[in-house]
Image: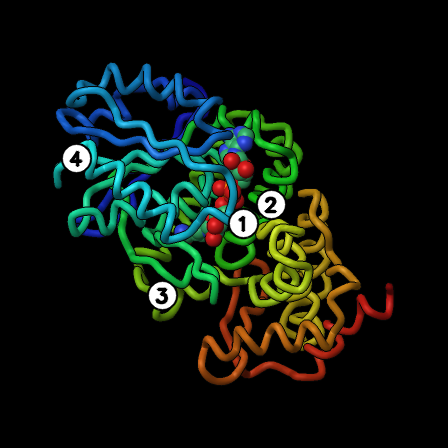
């Protein structure tokens, strides 16, 4: 099979494999080790279920699972990432008398993965689950690392748990049905790994970004594998986000302000992160940390991925400040930003130049 890649997330007893490539949904040998002999509940949604449910069912038939899989199809959308949805899942699991040895398979994007993973984390004090992510963002980010959870009216992702999957099975063919905006949003997270710690990968992306947008199988599987490897290394070093894991937030402080400022959903998370990374690059150049060539390379790649370099004028500098202050409160203290000292070298700091931040927030207001 061309474009097949595998890697392991090294977490001692909780280590797990990630299998990546085209046709993975039809490869029972990838799912069987995690599911054989078990009762299985599949959690998906009303968009992904009709597209890929049949293929998964056929593969489960070949995995010698116990009985028929329980099928749970959630409504689509971030607004359903709630405790109420988790409760619905738990009720279905209890009604079907799934025991502690049962497994959940999450088939869908990051929303499905986060909800299903959290249900797995708390059902009968925790059962194992398998991630079958179907968006690029979920394939390179949310399905790896073990963060699961749901939103609360008072904050996004405020209720949750660390619960590592047993396996992650990534079928790159599923990206063929993904809307282009969603693909571009996922590419922002791919570029992020190059920017924060892998200059070689960044250079590779400069060569292959068009192939990725065209969904060429081999470059796609390679980019996903390398992204997962980056995330896996960071997670292995810092599973619960005490230090280095925070670097994964490059572009996120600016990005969150854009998402919240425009009203959640107007900008996709990855789109906001792409613009946030361009802002971080410009601010880093202003501080003399990143040279001009580095800033230009960062911006060029972000633009070629189909992402905007400038935030929307509707989020004024003052609004940015307000929204970034909320992030600051969460970090209980000074605003901390992830900035760049070079391509492949990110730093988390509260020692930044306020004037550089101010100029970065004002530049688009001047342009607009
Ligand atoms: N757990 C983590 O570490 C982590 C990290 C990053 C983001 N997240 C979470 O992930 C979520 C965002 O995930 P997302 O970007 O995957 O969004 P999503 O799950 O909402 O998927 C985006 C849209 O694409 C649809 N879709 C999914 N796969 C498809 C396919 N193959 N073809 C056609 N349509 C498809 C979905 O139904 C949805 O409408 C957020 O809730 C975010 O908080 C979690």
The response on whether ligand 1 sits within 8 Å of label 1 is: yes
- Residue found at x 49% / y 26%: 174
Q: Residue at x 27, y 20 (%)?
A: 60
- The answer to whether mark 2 is within 8 Å of ligand 1 is yes
Which quadrant of the figure has residue 116? top left
CA–CA distance between discs 2 and 4?
Answer: 36 Å
- Determine contact: label 2, label 4, CB under 8 Å: no
| Residue 138 image label | none
Vertical position of residue 141 compared to residue 18: above or below: below
Q: Distance of mark 2 from mark 1, alpha carbons? A: 7 Å
Considering only order in the chain, which callout, 3 or 4, is on the residue closer to the N terminus? 4
Tell whether 69 sits left or right of 343: left
Residue corresponding to mark 4: 98
Q: What separation in Å lies between label 1 and label 3 (alpha carbons)?
A: 18 Å
Q: Which residue is mark 1?
A: 189
SS for callout 2 = helix
Pointer 3 local density, CA inside 10 Å: few below 14, some 14–19, many at least 20: few
Residue 241 - label: 3
Marks 4,1: beta carbons within 8 A: no
């Amino acid at each position: 099979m061309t474009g097949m890649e595998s890697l392991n997330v090294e977490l001692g007893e909780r280590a797990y494999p990630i299998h990546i490539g085209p046709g993975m949904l039809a490869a029972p040998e990838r799912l069987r080790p995690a599911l054989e002999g078990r009762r299985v509940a599949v959690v998906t949604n009303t968009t992904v279920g009709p597209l890929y449910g049949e293929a998964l069912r056929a593969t489960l038939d070949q995995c010698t699972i116990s009985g028929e899989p329980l099928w749970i199809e959630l409504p689509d959308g971030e607004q359903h990432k709630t405790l109420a949805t988790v409760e619905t899942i738990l009720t279905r699991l209890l009604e079907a008398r799934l025991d502690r040895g049962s497994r959940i398979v999450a088939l869908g994007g990051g929303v499905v993965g986060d909800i299903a993973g959290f249900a797995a984390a708390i059902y009968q004090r925790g059962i194992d689950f398998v991630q079958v992510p179907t968006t690029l963002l979920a394939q390179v980010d949310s399905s790896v690392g073990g963060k699961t959870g749901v939103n609360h009216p008072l904050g996004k992702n405020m209720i949750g748990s660390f619960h590592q999957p047993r396996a992650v099975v990534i079928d790159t063919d599923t990206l063929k049905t993904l809307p282009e905006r969603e693909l571009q949003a996922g590419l922002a997270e791919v570029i992020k790994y190059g920017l924060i710690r892998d200059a070689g990968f960044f250079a590779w992306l400069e060569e292959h970004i068009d192939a990725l947008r065209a969904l060429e199988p081999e470059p796609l599987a390679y980019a996903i594998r390398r992204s997962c490897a980056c995330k896996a290394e960071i997670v292995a070093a810092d599973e619960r986000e005490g230090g280095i894991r925070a670097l994964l937030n490059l572009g996120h402080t600016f990005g969150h302000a854009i998402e919240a400022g425009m009203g959640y959903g107007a900008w996709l998370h990855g789109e906001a992160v792409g613009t946030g990374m361009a802002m971080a690059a410009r601010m880093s150049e202003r501080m003399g940390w990143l040279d001009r060539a580095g800033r230009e390379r960062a911006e060029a790649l972000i633009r070629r991925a189909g992402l905007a370099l400038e935030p929307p004028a509707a989020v004024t500098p003052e609004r940015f400040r307000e929204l970034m202050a909320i992030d600051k409160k969460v970090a209980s203290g000074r605003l901390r930003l992830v900035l760049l000292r070079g391509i492949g070298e990110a730093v988390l700091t509260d020692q930044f130049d306020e004037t550089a931040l101010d100029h970065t927030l004002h530049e688009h207001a001047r342009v607009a």
